Amino acid sequence: MTKLLALTDIHIKPVGQTIIGLDPYENFKRALKHAFDHHPDAERVILMGDLTNSGTPEEYARFGEVLKSCDKPITLMCGNHDQRDNLTAAFPWATLDANGFVQDAFVYGNTRVLTIDTQYGPPFVSYAHFGAYCDARFDWLNTQLAAAKAEGQNVALFAHHPPFKVGLKGLDQIRMRDDKRMAQTLAFADVPVHLLCGHLHRTISGSWHGHGFTVFKSTCHQTPLAFDDPSMSLSTAEPAAYGVILLTNDGVIAHTEDFDLAEDDVQPSSEAMSDA
Ligand SMILES: [Fe+2]
Ligand SMILES: [Fe+2]
């Protein structure tokens, strides 16, 4: 079994700036420390996009400061709040595909882990909070899925933007818009796929065209459960979280940990057992 850590929607801002009173930098530091203290056996850290709030060099420098505490392999992903050029300039070790998209693939046991770049563009468009996937990226994905099929592997598909709707009117507008083509691509690949997404700042699970999915909370601010509100930016200071993913021979398991609520003095509860 392989354990991965997933942190998403970190939204680092310049010194002294907060989001609804929350400090993204301090939250990220606390999340990463909690994850490392409790999961020293994790193989890799996947940072799932919206690494910064505006994608400026100043914000990437602050993000990089926190990463200095990380002694594990790191995978970076690109979200709508990032700027791909600034991201890759700040972190030249980030893995890019042959066309310059921030995409990576690695294999643990019989699971092929794919981290895809769903940012609209280039060119960068600051107001394009919806995601996209293009011919070049679909070519890359088709190659990876064919390799998974040939090797008999499960696929853990990490994407910042979910291609599926979740019933939240505001956020459904800013999903990855090449959703039909993505569904066709995954169907044609004929391999077991579990999607792991960010962007929605809320814990959500379900299935889409037969594929399981998990959406993780932000390490900073969250989205309230407001189904009919058309706003794309409603935020609440509900507890933040990170993801702990277990890759087994049988499939993908996704846990989520509210790191500010997690208690270390865990005790057995005989009452709870007898009530279960
Ligand atoms: Fe975000
Ligand atoms: Fe996002």
Image (tube, helix red, strand yellow):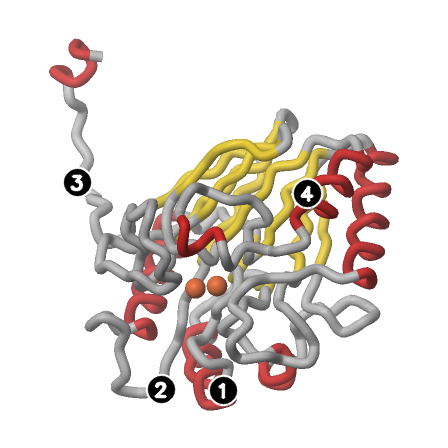
At which x and y percent is residue 49?
52, 65
The residues tagged by marks 2 and 1 sit, at their Cα atoms, a distance apart of 9 Å
Q: Does residue 170 appear in the picture of this structure?
A: yes
Kindly report which numbered mark, 1 or 3, lies closer to the viewer in this rendering: 1
Classify mark 1 as within 8 Å of ligand 1 or not, answering yes or no. Answer: no
Residues tagged 2 and 1 counted as in contact (Cβ below 8 A): yes
The residues tagged by marks 1 and 3 sit, at their Cα atoms, a distance apart of 41 Å
Label 4 secondary element: strand
Say left or right for 239 vs 150.
left
The residues tagged by marks 3 and 2 sit, at their Cα atoms, a distance apart of 36 Å
Amino acid type at circle 4 is: Tyr
The first of marks 4 and 2 along the sequence is 2
| For residue 168, above or below residue 266 | below
The first of marks 1 and 4 along the sequence is 1
The first of marks 3 and 4 along the sequence is 4
Tag 1 residue: 56
Residue density around tag 1, few if under 14, some if 14–19, many if 20 or more, within 10 Å:
some
Residue density around tag 4, few if under 14, some if 14–19, many if 20 or more, within 10 Å:
some
Kindly report which numbered mark, 3 or 2, lies closer to the viewer in this rendering: 2
Tag 3 residue: 265
Tag 2 residue: 14
Amino acid type at circle 3 is: Asp
- List the single residue furthest toward the top: 274
Amino acid type at circle 1 is: Thr
Tag 4 residue: 108
